[in-house]
Every structure is written in C-alpha cells, then in structure tokens.
Image (cartoon, rainbow, N blue to C red):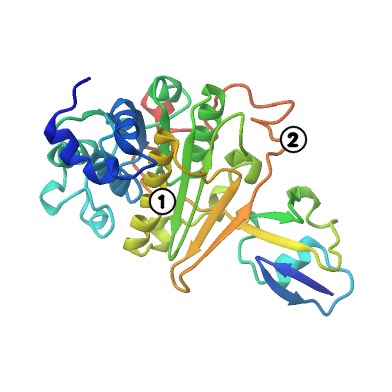
Amino acid sequence: MNIRVNGETQVLAEGSVTVARLLDIQQVESPDMVSVQRNGDFVERDNFGSTLLAENDEIEFLYFMGGGACGCLGVRC
Amino acid sequence: MELSDSYLERYSRHILLHDVGVEGQEKLSAAKVLILGAGGLGAPVALYLAAAGVGTIGILDHDLVELSNLQRQVVHFTRDIGAPKVDSARQKMLAINPELIVKTYQDYLCAANIREVIDGYDFVVDGVDNFPTKFLINDACVMAGIPFSHGGILRFDGQTMTVVPGRSACYRCVFRTPPPSDAVPTCSQAGVLGAIAGMLGTIQATEVLKYITGVGDLLTDTLLSFNAKAMTFRRVAIKRQPACPVCGERPTITKLVDAEQSVCDLKR
C-alpha cells in the first residue's frame, strides 16, 4: 500500500495498517506529542488504534513544539 | 498629523514599499502588540517590532536573565545577567526606538490574569515554552477575539501558525489538549540551536507587521514547520474544526482554567 507521510511516499508492506501502527512503523518516539491529520481531517487520539489507512492516504504528523521563554508561565518547566 | 522628517527618514524603507507606505507606517505607530515571553522567540520579536515602530509594545516575563539564555535570547546582554528580562528587553527596545511606549509585566501568566493582560492589545505573540500556557493563550485570545501568532522551537525545528479568532483555525483545532507533561521535552532539557529562535521569531514578527498593515496573506489555516538540519520548510493546511472545544460550533471550553497547578496558585 502506498501512502504519503508528511509529503513523502511510503510503501507499506502490511495490508491493514492503523494510525497507531503507522506511528510505530515510523518509529515516532512519543506518540503523545503528535497530532495526526488524514486527508485533511484530524484523527481523534482515541481512534488511532481503530482508524485504518487506505491506498493513497495523505498523512501528516504534526508535532507539539514548545520553545521560547520559561519565565512567563503559570507552571514551571 | 504632521510627520517629522526624522519619522519619514527612520521608516523610509517601509514607506518606500507600495504595500506599506506612510499609511501602513502610521498603522504601525498606532498599533498595540503584546509579546508573551522575553526569551528565545520574544527577543527577536521585541527587537524587530521596536525597530519597525509598533507604537505600543507590551512584554511579559517573570524571569531574570541567566547566562544560559544568552546563546539565543539576543535582546539580553552579558551585563544584564540577574536583571528582570522585561527590563532588559525594554531598555534595548527603547535604545533602538525611543519614541515607543513599552509596557512591562514581570509576572507569570495564568487563568486569573491573562484576560486583563491581553485586554486592549491588537495582536499577541506567543513566545512561551510550556503547553498549558500555550493553550491558555489560545483560549484567552479566541474568547477575546484577539489575533495571535503561535510559535514553538525545539532542537533544530520550529513551527508557527497565525490565528485570527472567528476566521481561522485555532491552536486547539490542531492540538486538542496539552500533551502529558512527562512526554514533553523542553528546550532546557533537549537543547535548541540558538539561531532558530531568530528564524522563527522573525517569522512571527513579520506576521505581526502584515496583520497591522493589512499586507499579504497571513499564515492562517496553515502550520508552517521547518527543520534547520535539512533546511526544509513545510506548510500543512489546517481546517477549522467544527468540533474544536474552544472555537467550534459547540464550545465546551467557555472559561479559562489553569491546566495544572500553577505558580499563580502557589503564590496565593
């Protein structure tokens, strides 16, 4: 199955691949730090394990990114 | 208003731009912009907005300048170590442009004070390093209808997105809830290449100037990310989510709360 992940074509050897499995295949270290878009729509985190990918899916992994200043925060970092 | 020769000369390179002109420069002079965080992102934003002649600039940060800040927080100098970051930033901004009004807030940002802090500003720049606060900024700005620029940097990567409440996707449309705190690497743990703070911060400053002058197309409904190792930039289109808990059709977040116990609570 061919899909595109962050704009790059990926060939998946397995037949039925969920979003959770794809995160695993792509060796995403912290799945909690990723928001996943499939063909322009966000996949709810609770559905990562049940959402099956299809041929030519366009997948985007969008990573949480902090950065900037620490001293203006309501919570310590 | 009669514009002085020094005004026309100082801003001549803006005024020469057909899209900006005297009219755009006067919009900048009349604008009020708030920078949340006087760190890696806030530093270049503060310098460029001051240079650009944004008339009123607010800057919030609780911290004092530390030696480890100087690798990327270019508004602070070695001699400023130990001084409040907001005072250090204000001094440099006024040295660049003495005609500005620079308001400083040496405070933490939390649910109890954010509404009051952002009130009256035309645009807010998120330069904070902590997800609960990023979500708080998003929610408060969406509720108050104040546009803002989200920015984040880590290691060799950066991301930014401009949010115009009611018109474009918000931060919660992309990232529904803050990540679990044990999953989060911060710059102080993971490191960050100093110059990427400038790369990202100057994009945020550019968005401010575009918003105020009405020039060009804002980075709305788009998450722009870059990786400085490969020096690749990528834009991902984001749709406003009808199910978004803060800007969606049936918002479930209607008041501001701190996601975790905050320093603000501890202070009380």
- Quick check: can you spot residue B61? no
Give the residue at x 25% y 60%.
Answer: B71
Give the residue at x 69% y 26%.
Answer: B251
Report the side of B24 relative to B166 (left or right). Answer: left
* Residue at numbered disc 2: B243
Of helix, strand and loop, which one carries label 2?
loop
Q: Foreground mark, 1 or 2?
A: 1
Q: Is residue B121 above or below residue B181?
A: above
In the rendered view of the protein, which quadrant contains the N terminus of chain B?
top left
Report the side of A31 relative to B51 (left or right). Answer: right
Disc 2 residue type?
Ala
Q: Is residue B264 above or below residue B196?
A: above
Label 1 to label 2, Cα distance in Å? 29 Å
Q: Residues within 10 Å of mark 1 (few under 14, many from 20)?
A: many
Of helix, strand and loop, which one carries label 1?
helix
**Answer yes or no: do the residues labelled 1 and 2 have beta carbons within 8 Å?**
no
* In-front residue for pair A72/A77: A72
In the rendered view of the protein, which quadrant contains the C terminus of chain B?
top left
Horizontal and vertical percent position of residue A59 = 72, 61
Q: Is residue B203 above or below residue B22?
A: below
Disc 1 residue type?
Ile
* Residue at numbered disc 1: B203
Marked residue chain, label 2? B
Q: Earlier in the sequence, mark 1 or mark 2?
A: 1
Report the side of B121 relative to A57 (left or right). Answer: left
- Quick check: can you spot residue B101? yes
Image quadrant in which you'd find residue A27: bottom right
Marked residue chain, label 1? B
Horizontal and vertical percent position of residue B240 = 68, 39
